[in-house]
Amino acid sequence: MSQWLSAARVLEENTKEGNYFEAQSGIYALRRVQTLLETTFPQMMFLLGEPGSGKSFMLHHLKRLYEKKRLCVLIENPFLSPAQLLQRLLSCAGITATSHDVEALRLQAVEAYTGVDHLIMLDEAQLMSAQLREFVRILSDSKVFYFLIAMHQREGEEMLSLAHFHSRPHQVIYLGDLQPSECVPYLAKELQSVGFFNVEALLGKRLMEEAWRYSRGNFRNFKKCFYHLFLLLDYAQTHQKKEFLKPSLVLLRMAAIRARVLASELNTDDFDQLLHEARRKSGGKHKALVASLVMVVGMGAVWYYTHTALFSPHAKREKSLGVEYVAPSSEVELKTHEETFSSEPLHVKDEALPMEPLVEEQTQAIATQEAEEIAQEEIIKEEIIKEETIKVEHNTASVLQNPNLPPPTSLPKTIRILPFRGVSTATGLDEQY
């Protein structure tokens, strides 16, 4: 038998094995149970945890610890009726059942366990029917029995939320998952019997971290990953696959797929098919990682340019805004220029110019524009005055003459007739003539 195959057999599921690893959550749960047994009155205690968190290991470990101190009853398979439970309790206490009636058996069990240090542990209690759970609660109400009930966390919390359970005295103990820092000590303790004394050097820190990530800290899934990894290593050694004679991340992914820890449609033990599936998934992951890195680098470059190259006070060149203005030469160009200048954005000048000269140039340009506008208005006013001026040509017929006077020696000069404002004799109103 190869060393890899021996390591795989050590990691086979075996809750009765005495090599119990005291993880942080396990130590807390164990101390809590011990405290409740020694300081409180008999009541129900619930050990809750996710599937594979080590509840069954905890119950077997408690039995090994207390079997010499008190009467320990461990029922791993759910019983089918209240009578079966009572008969089992009487049998463990060394008493023969005298009746098949449930009430008579209950009274006999209460009498047998009164004043006796004991611990009754029920595993996989989530498989019990609602009727049997209610019967256990009734037995607990007698204040005689210490019940430690192990069940899945979700089902346990749902049951305890019911009024007839929530109102009764009970204690809840949670069993957590394996922590990343506990992976190496846990695996070293499991494999020390087959000569694996330096697990981290043999498997590598990176591989241990990936195994924890695949299993999400679940004890059962973590062991399954390495169980199948050692089987694959044994296969590679016996079939001369030189590329896979040592533990690697590819082999670990193959083991996780084979153990159904990683989701995959492939359900086979064939080495080559597992290798193809592992590389395919790993390639997709690497492509996604590269794409993410490219995007992050691109966003970082944009951020650096906008926040450092443009707006940093320590930049070598300052970017200043300058308005380029060209004075129009005619009224049409003036109108066109004003429409264009109001609609177009400011032109950014790339010269590293000081701010004061730019302000002076802008002020001069605005002053020049205002002066030209005033001159243009004066020209327009003069043209309007010329148009309103009335010229009267010399005409002898329009000149009033006195018949008693001699005719003039020269023609009258051109005169300007201004409007006269007076009162009309016909209407009596103020009119303009």
Image (cartoon, rainbow, N blue to C red):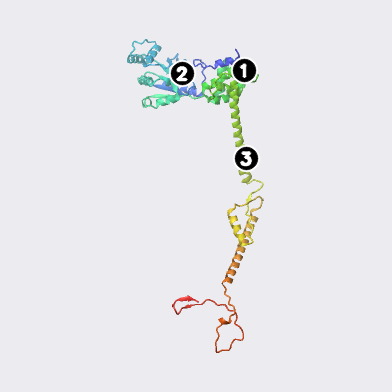
Relative side of 108 to 124, left or right: left
Q: Is residue 400 above or below residue 188?
A: below
Instruction: Examine the image and state in which quarter residue 189 appears.
Output: top right
Indicate the amino acid at tag 1.
Answer: Ala
Front one among 409 and 252: 409
| Residue picked out by circle 1 | 236
Residue 55 screen position, x and y as percent: 47, 20
Residue at 64% in and 49% down: 319
Q: How busy is the neighbourhood of tag 2: few (under 14 within 10 Å), some, or many (20 plus)?
A: many
Earlier sequence position, callout 2 versus callout 3: 2
Disc on the earlier residue, 2 or 1: 2
Would you place residue 431 above or below residue 1 in this image?
A: below
Which residue does the numbered mark 3 point to in the structure image?
Answer: 301
Up/down of 103 relative to 161, above or below = above
- Callout 2, which amino acid? Leu
Whole-number angstrom distance, CA of label 1 to CA of label 3 = 46 Å
Query: According to the image, label 2 marks what residue?
Result: 59
